[in-house]
Amino acid sequence: MGARSTYVMTAFVISTIGAVALSGCTAGEPVPTRTVTVSATPRALAPGDTDVSAAAVCGQVSAVETITFNAADAHQRGALGDEAYRSRLDAARFVYERLPSVGDVGASVAELQTWWLTDHPADGSALALDPDDAELQDAIQSVGAACSAVGSPVSISAASGG
């Protein structure tokens, strides 16, 4: 870069800084303030109570399905070892066993719990949930259909892919 280019660049930078510094507030003006009032609304549930609303239950199903889907994908790609994969399926089963079986989607949850989980007890030799089991997938799809019917569809957030 030549001397003239350097001079022009320097002049441009100095003039820009000067314009920014001279614009805006003048000395001695108070800075405006904004007051925001926030009030907390207490939860409708007492400690220890369970939210049996469709939104809460279907949200839990979405979370569990996201975990199992991503675990299966990572396990298949070799990014998740056998023990870690099993632990995620154990956690998924734990949540499914404890979902509230009352409320708008309670019947389909109860069906999942009695139809598949009871008939397939967890033991140390088999996976806690078998993602390839057609009956399990049918039971989960039944819960998903019930959730969709009440306006709380189940969704899965994939961690990989395009």
Image (cartoon, grey):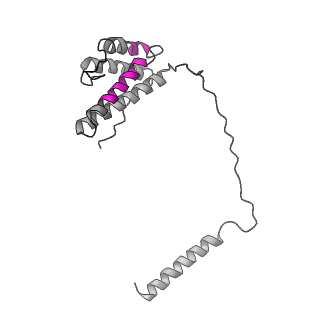
**Residue 89: percent from left, percent from top:** 32, 27
Q: Is residue 30 left or right of residue 60?
A: right
**Residue 145: percent from left, percent from top:** 37, 20
Dominant SS in magenta: helix
Looking at the image, is 100 positioned above or below residue 22?
above
**Residue 44: percent from left, percent from top:** 60, 23
Q: Which quadrant is home to the N terminus?
A: bottom left
The image quadrant of residue 29 is bottom right
Looking at the image, is 84 positioned above or below residue 54?
below
Q: Is residue 154 visible?
A: no
Q: Is residue 117 left or right of residue 11?
A: left
Q: Which quadrant is home to the C terminus?
A: top left
Furthest-front residue in view? Answer: 124
Magenta highlight range: 86-110
**Residue 91: percent from left, percent from top:** 37, 26
* Foreground of the two, 104 or 39: 39
Q: Residue at x 41, y 12 (%)?
A: 107
Looking at the image, is 89 positioned above or below residue 119?
below
Q: Residue at x 57, y 77 (%)?
A: 15
The image quadrant of residue 43 is top right
* Foreground of the two, 65 or 11: 65
Q: Is residue 144 left or right of residue 39?
A: left
**Residue 92 belongs to magenta span:** yes
Q: Is residue 30 visible?
A: yes
* Foreground of the two, 100 or 86: 86
